[in-house]
Amino acid sequence: MKIKHVVLAFSLLLLFVCCTKRSISDIEKKQALEDYTICNQIAKEWLNQLDSSDYSHLLSVKLPDGYQDNNFEEKTLSVINEAQKVYGKINNRKFIGAHFWSGNKLITYAPNLEYKILTHINARKSIDGFYIVKPRYFGLSSYRQMFSGYPKGKHVILMYQSSPTNKSYAEERLTLWYNPQGNWQVLDYKIADEI
């Protein structure tokens, strides 16, 4: 467990080292918070269904035409089986942060970073929890690479620390997309030791 905290602290160090000085406008922050409010509610409901279905709710994810391959269901069943065996039921989860992609700018919202982590990595907390992160933090040369396998448009990635039954720690990522019909929909879910 101590190793996980060191890894998390190192990841957060990279996050702050890679933050740029570009600013985020009040309008962008307001839009991100509006998107977060909507997506957070969708995520809570979706994750509750995932928890109560022992991961089989993953089969409800519907990708738009052209983004779902022929083996999608088979791959999803494999992911479900793996999650059941390796992680088991999620006992609780805590929101870590969110990434907002508007098509031209990636904004990160991490409002509850702990003071001891900030002190440990010698970083200042953003008063409003908003950061702009350089793409190299994610091992990418551009932000667009982060969403290259997804449909064009707005995306929100919500990240959580979790306590599963079969392990002491896991991280979850839920990706939502604002579809052409004007609704947010879940595109992707992942659970892993580290996201």
Image: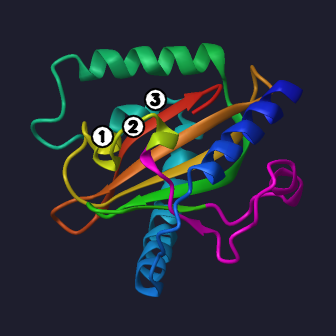
Q: Amino acid at mark 3?
A: Ser
Q: Which residues are magenta?
A: 110-135
- Circle 1 is placed at which residue position? 145
Question: Label 3 near label 1: C-beta < 8 Å?
Answer: no
Where residue 41 appears, as percent x and y from the top left, is: 52, 65
Relative side of 149 to 193, left or right: left
Q: Secondary structure at mark 3?
A: helix
- Circle 3 is placed at which residue position? 56
Q: Is residue 52 magenta?
A: no
Residue 55 in the image: above or below residue 113: above
Instruction: Give whichever of 71, 150 is nearer the camera.
Output: 150
Residue 2 in the image: above or below residue 20: above
Where residue 87 appears, as percent x and y from the top left, is: 66, 22
Where residue 121 appears, as percent x and y from the top left, is: 80, 49
Q: Quadrant of residue 188?
A: top left
Where residue 125 appears, as percent x and y from the top left, is: 74, 67
Relative side of 116 to 34, left or right: right
Question: Label 1 near label 2: C-beta < 8 Å?
Answer: yes
Dot 1 or dot 3: first in sequence order is 3
Dot 3 or dot 2: first in sequence order is 3
Q: Residues within 10 Å of mark 2 (few under 14, many from 20)?
A: few
Of tags 3 and 2, which is closer to the observer?
2
Q: Secondary structure at mark 1?
A: helix
Q: Amino acid at mark 1?
A: Gln
Looking at the image, which residue is at 46% across and 41% down?
136
